[in-house]
Image (tube, rainbow, N blue to C red):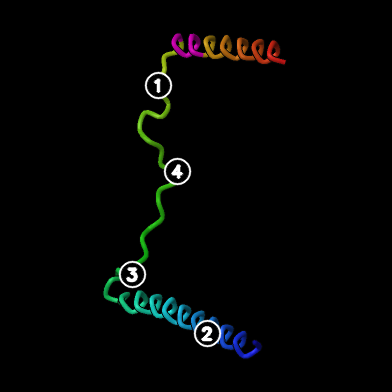
Amino acid sequence: MLALWDLQKSRLVCCALLIAAFMLGGCSSQLADMSAADTPAHPKEPAGYLPVHDLPPDRDQAIIPPDQRAKIEAELAAARDRQAVAAKDAK
């Protein structure tokens, strides 16, 4: 009975080793497909830094006219108040 157990255990170990070998073989074939020709070459001179302090044109002009801005702010404040009342009532 003990010999049968050892035989099954050795078969299991052999199968595990065979599966591991196939898995590692699959990884190495993918690595072999990669070549240095596929990678882009580095530029000889590094690119300059992006202009951080340059602002887009017409930055000083308001996009929304003041009267529309006041109307939008009033609508948002009213919505906030309605939500606060609804949250208080839900408790």
Crowding at dot 1, Cα within 10 Å, few <14 / some 14-19 / many 20+, comes out as: few
The residue to which callout 1 is attached is 63
Q: Nearer the viewer, mark 3 or mark 1?
A: 3
Residue at x 57%, y 88% (from the top left corner) = 7
> In what element is the residue under mark 1?
loop
Residue 77 in which image quadrant: top right
- Distance in Å between CA atoms under marks 1 and 4: 21 Å
> In what element is the residue under mark 3?
loop
Q: Nearer the viewer, mark 3 or mark 2?
A: 2
- The disc placed on residue 42 is 3
The three-letter code of the residue at mark 1 reads Ile
Crowding at dot 2, Cα within 10 Å, few <14 / some 14-19 / many 20+, comes out as: few
- Residue 71 at x, y = what percent? 48, 9
Q: Earlier in the sequence, mark 1 or mark 2?
A: 2
Crowding at dot 4, Cα within 10 Å, few <14 / some 14-19 / many 20+, comes out as: few
- Residue 15 at x, y = what percent? 49, 81
